[in-house]
Amino acid sequence: MILVTGGAGFIGANFVLDWLAGSAEPILNVDKLTYAGNLGTLKSLKDDARHVFVRADICDRAAMDALLAQHKPRAVLHFAAESHVDRSIHGPADFVQTNVVGTFTLLEATRMYWSALPEAEKQAFRFLHVSTDEVFGSLSATDPQFSETTPYAPNSPYSATKAGSDHLVRAYHHTYGLPVLTTNCSNNYGPYQFPEKLIPLMIANALAGKPLPVYGDGQNVRDWLYVGDHCSAIREVLARGALGETYNVGGWNEKKNLEVVHTLCDLLDRAKPKSSGSYRDQITYVTDRPGHDRRYAIDARKLERELGWKPAETFETGLAKTVQWYLDNQAWADEVASGEYRKWVETNYAQRA
Ligand code: NAD
Ligand code: DAU
């Protein structure tokens, strides 16, 4: 089996669902179930013996040792993290704890487990670390895209802790020979994303008749990738990636935030027209995110050249699917927008002029 951390979160759960749709190999899903973890996302797997869920914290060394010893996975895929930049600005401590201490704890437990494996299993073992393009910092409008050799320059507590975890993973390969792989991916979107992130937040607010809060001038650029394409890239890297290598994953879809919000409004205007006017009328400009990175852009040619991976979705097809998914799954969105979520909205948006 494979061990997945953070498999009740947005990307981890999409990965688990996609994996089990295409493979007989079971998954041990280890997740602490923070505010971002949601077992409702995995309810279609309730009676599926291939999915074993364990609620545990990756910072708990004894729990990690016991799970590895009991289930003997052939690979660890590490998705678990605190993942939201705005939350890292309001409270960085959880980010240092999970992203740095948690990754370190998981690496140590894995190293001990891996060192004791019989030679053939040791050779075949993999530790795949799921990281982000934010570790490379911010680009100007004319800078070339991030490549795998772009120097690290993280700017937020979130990206600094992810950079720290990437360095630990790299060091465990260099020093101990642990067979690691790292992916650095751009902004994901798609089903089951927690509505604190731009795209699901805008869809939820639009449908609720609330303001659509664009930070600053709305001209910040992100590269967008449909989550299913990120999952297929991870499967390719796990199967055929070169040990110790890092792979950039991106959608070749650089968009300004305002462009994304306009496209979402236009899709909603067609799918669920308002009684009068457009969803665009709800757009408001609010105080910018402190230290807001201006532009991210990914050069994903290495992954295409070496492993033949290319995204299947364009921004237009992926976003249309996503809007339709949120329209068809409002019960899921209502369930996650619970008490904790309302508190977060209050904390993040109340003081933005
Ligand atoms: P998410 O916040 O939706 O989910 C994170 C999951 O990790 C949750 O289920 C949570 O309960 C779990 N978790 C948190 N702390 C834990 C701990 N201490 N022990 C065990 N489980 C814990 O995040 P996501 O958007 O799905 O991101 C997954 C990974 O992909 C992260 O490592 C993130 O840095 C990376 N990433 C995300 C994006 C993106 O656009 N969302 C892009 C590139 C890379
Ligand atoms: O680049 C990959 C990263 O993408 C991942 O590593 C992170 O885990 C993920 O959260 C995401 O980070 P961003 O900060 O880019 O995503 P977010 O959805 O928070 O914001 C996207 C852009 O939209 C960003 O420029 C800020 C802006 N924004 C966001 C929110 C929540 C707004 O204008 N208004 C908002 O209300």
Image: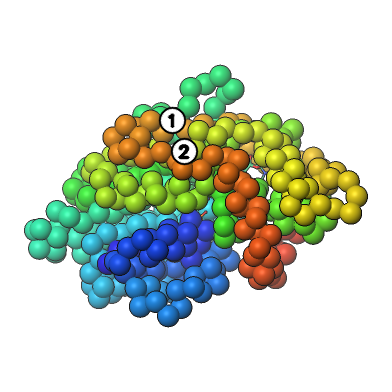
- How far from the left and from the top, in percent, is residue 292? 63, 37
- How far from the left and from the top, in percent, is residue 12? 45, 59
Tell me the crowding category of disc 1: few under 14, some 14 to 19, or many 20 or more residues within 10 angstroms, Cα based: some
- How far from the left and from the top, in percent, is residue 209? 83, 56
Is 233 displayed left or right of 192 in the figure? Answer: left
- How far from the left and from the top, in percent, is residue 138? 54, 31
Q: Indicate the colouring scheme.
A: rainbow
The quadrant of the rendered image in which ligand 2 is seen is top right
Between 228 and 56, the one nearer to me in the picture = 228
Is 165 displayed left or right of 34 in the figure? Answer: left
Q: Place residue 350 in its image quadrant.
A: bottom right
Q: Which residue is mark 1?
A: 299
Is 338 displayed left or right of 178 in the figure? Answer: right
Say which residue appears at 27% left-offset and 43% top-offset.
241
Q: Which residue is mark 2?
A: 250
Between 80 and 58, the one nearer to me in the picture = 80
Is residue 68 positioned above or below 150 on the image? below
Residue extending farthest to the left is: 119
Is 142 displayed left or right of 68 in the figure? Answer: right
**Helix, strand or loop at mark 2:** loop
Between 235 and 222, the one nearer to me in the picture = 235
Dots 2, 1 in contact, CB < 8 A: yes
